[in-house]
Image (cartoon, rainbow, N blue to C red):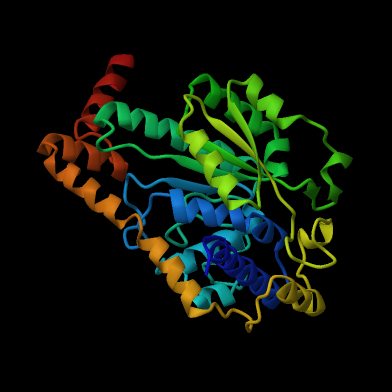
């Protein structure tokens, strides 16, 4: 199997888990996972620093699915990579009451979900906050302990919301160069073509706010990889406009609004399986492809072990302060200092 064949089959595993889950639920958004699967495969197998066995490791890279309606992209990834909270049964229970696989990702309901997304633009705003936190923590504790990226997958809707301008303006002003936003530039909204409602030159808008801007074919894994490396080398935050086909592989619905927010249907799924050479039953991922994904999930375990060694070498005061801040605990003297200040004011 060539590297390109392997990539395509790994990406197709994401596509068909999303297709099958949405079809079983008779509700959901299969188009984005199908269109963005190539981007996600490159990002998670080559770049993202994480450890499925320690999902809350402080120095992991953050991945924010700002386009939260495409939640099956994230759930498929978490299952394939071996996150304990996302079994195949959870994938099969997509959008069912009580499952971790809600219609939009919900923080706290499963390890690997960094923030709740769904309200358009919210994920992008949260990610700017995460990038600011990384910058502050790195300044306080050095790059030996804090040195990670925040990646965002955003849709047209995220960029149309007003909050996106406020968030991206701040990120550009602060030169948050470890923030990389990948825009799923598929030209389709739930009501039809984006051009019906918006004609903004997004690359120009981001550039005007101090961002590095790049474009790439969102279905070319070699080009995607090279573009992410370019983004990592920038001294500014980066927007990557990734041109994709929504519902990639669907014979009659790809590239249309019909695949945005509705199941494909039995006939279209059959045609998609034929078009993408995926002759497997619903929810079936061949063992060699699942193994390849699980190996990708273990890739960053070495980075986590190296970090643990560096953390152990730090002095006790630094370790205690680092852990306190990451738990979200206030300093021990905070309550007394605040009471004294209130008395002074009164």
Q: Residue at the spot x=52%, y=61% of the render?
A: 3
Question: Percent from the top left, x then y, of residue 58?
Answer: 32, 46
- Most foreground residue, 262 or 285: 285
Quadrant of the image for the C terminus?
A: top left
Question: Percent from the top left, x then y, of residue 234?
Answer: 49, 28
Q: Residue at the spot x=51%, y=43% of the render?
A: 151
Q: Residue at the spot x=38%, y=40% of the render?
A: 148
Could you tell whether 98 is left or right of 217 in the image?
A: left
Q: Is residue 117 visible?
A: yes
Q: Residue at the spot x=68%, y=78% of the render?
A: 24
Question: Percent from the top left, x then y, of residue 170?
Answer: 54, 24
Could you tell whether 274 is left or right of 256 in the image?
A: left
Q: Quadrant of residue 74?
A: bottom right
- Most foreground residue, 227 or 304: 227
Could you tell whether 205 is left or right of 54 in the image?
A: right
Work out whether 297 lies above or below 209.
Answer: below
- Most foreground residue, 223 or 259: 223
Question: Percent from the top left, x then y, of residue 11?
Answer: 58, 63
């Amino acid at each position: 199997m060539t590297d390109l064949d392997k990539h395509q089959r790994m990406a197709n595993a994401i596509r068909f888990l999303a297709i099958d889950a949405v079809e079983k639920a008779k509700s959901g958004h299969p188009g984005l996972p199908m269109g963005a699967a190539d981007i996600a495969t490159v990002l998670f197998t080559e770049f993202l620093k994480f450890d499925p066995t320690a999902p809350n490791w402080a120095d992991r890279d953050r991945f924010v699915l700002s386009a939260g309606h495409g939640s099956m992209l994230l759930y498929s990834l978490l299952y394939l990579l071996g996150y304990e909270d996302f079994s195949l049964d959870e994938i099969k229970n997509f959008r069912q009451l009580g499952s971790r696989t809600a219609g939009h990702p919900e923080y706290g309901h499963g390890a690997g979900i960094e923030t709740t997304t769904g309200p358009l633009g919210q994920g992008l705003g949260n990610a700017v906050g995460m990038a600011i936190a990384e910058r502050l923590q790195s300044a306080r504790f050095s790059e030996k302990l804090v040195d990670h990226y925040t990646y965002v997958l955003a849709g047209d809707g995220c960029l149309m919301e007003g909050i996106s301008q406020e968030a991206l303006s701040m990120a550009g002003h602060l030169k948050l160069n470890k923030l990389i936003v990948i825009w799923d530039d598929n030209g389709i909204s739930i009501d039809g073509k984006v051009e019906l409602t918006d004609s903004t030159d997004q690359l120009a808008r981001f550039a005007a706010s101090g961002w590095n801007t790049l474009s790439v074919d969102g279905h070319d894994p070699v080009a995607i990889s090279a573009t992410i490396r370019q983004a990592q080398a920038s001294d500014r935050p980066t927007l990557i406009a990734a041109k994709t086909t929504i519902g990639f592989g669907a014979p009659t619905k790809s590239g249309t609004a019909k695949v945005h927010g509705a199941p494909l249907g039995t006939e279209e799924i059959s045609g998609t399986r034929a078009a993408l050479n995926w002759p497997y039953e619903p929810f079936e991922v061949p063992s060699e492809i699942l193994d390849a994904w699980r190996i990708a999930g273990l890739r960053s375990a070495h980075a986590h072990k190296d970090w643990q060694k560096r953390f152990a070498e730090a002095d006790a005061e630094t370790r205690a302060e680092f852990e306190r801040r990451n738990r979200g605990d206030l300093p021990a003297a905070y309550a007394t200092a605040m009471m004294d200040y209130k008395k002074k004011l009164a």
